Image (cartoon, rainbow, N blue to C red):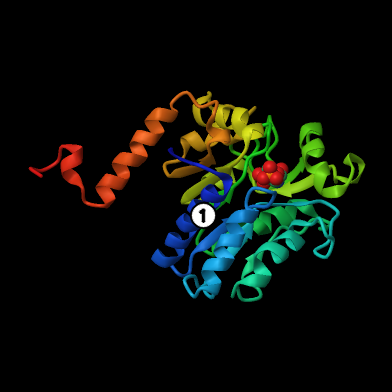
Amino acid sequence: MRVIIEDSPAAACVKAACIIGEQLQRKPASVLGLATGGSPVGVYDELTRLHNCGELDFSKVITFNLDEYVGLGPDHSQSYRFFMRTHLFDHVNLPQGSTHVPDGRSLDFDSYCESYESKIREHGGIDLQLLGIGTDGHIAFNEPGSSLGSRTRLKTLTSETIRDNARFFGSEDAVPRLAVTMGVGTILESRCCLLIAYGEHKASAIAKAVEGPVTAQVTASALQLHRDVIVVLDQAAATQLNRQAYYREVEDAQSLLESGQLGKLGIGDE
Ligand code: GLP
């Protein structure tokens, strides 16, 4: 796991957008896995800015979102499809039909969820999956106790998640009780995972996810089993990490390597 600690949430968003941008430059027809919630908003703003400057082209990109509330249609102001339109889809040149957000109004969720998984496979799998984290350590809507091998399916939200997300709905009663969500197993199949978190209220979940035991009680901890994970944090979200100093040393060494300053790493005879 690569852990990058930036000075502020804004800097963390720019860093995450930069990582996504590099992915699109390497592979213009990338399949991106996208997330919702407060955390990715700044990332989408930066991606939009880069697109407007002519630095990012989404014309060949395919996207798959992690999850959707059950019962909300695409025009509901709190649906994740609406969120994605507002924060990204309407601002970049993603062709119609290239974006996929689970449908929260299916009448047959079992077959719908299977078809969502098939579509991801048909497009060759997800190259880079953006993730936020819940205060209980969940990714997408994989609440504590979700199988670490789980696939796209219906999930009942915990009272903690309902409380956390009530800020978007005005009251806890208005938050849907169920969601359709990619599973932990689905997420782990992405070629690269990019987890972002800001603020002190995420510090405990981040410490458990990054340095705690791998457990279904903190589904983000399953990312420790993945070979290519980048975690981008602000300082507040990093406060409970025991190995902060080491993560910073790794990043310093990485930038010396990238800028060719090999002598400072004791390589060569500079
Ligand atoms: C919801 C979403 C998650 C998101 C989490 C945290 O539960 N399903 O994908 O990571 O909220 O959201 P926020 O970034 O608003 O804290």
> Taking 65 as reference, is 95 above or below it?
below
The residue labelled by disc 1 is 14
What's under tag 1, amino acid-wise? Answer: Val
Q: Is residue 62 visible?
A: no
Crowding at mark 1 (Cα within 10 Å: few <14, some 14-19, many 20+): some
In the shown orientation, is residue 241 left or right of residue 82? left
Helix, strand or loop at label 1? It is helix
Check the picture and name the quadrant holding the C terminus. top left
Check the picture and name the quadrant holding the N terminus. top left
- In this rendered view, identify the residue nearer to me: 108 or 138: 138
Which residue is rendered at x = 67% and y = 38% of the image?
134
In the shown orientation, is residue 85 left or right of residue 221? right
> Taking 159 as reference, is 229 above or below it?
below
Which residue is rendered at x = 65% and y = 27% of the image?
217
Q: Is residue 35 visible?
A: yes
> Taking 214 as reference, is 25 above or below it?
below
Residue 207 in percent (x, y) is at: 55, 28
Which residue is rendered at x = 15% and y = 42% of the image?
263
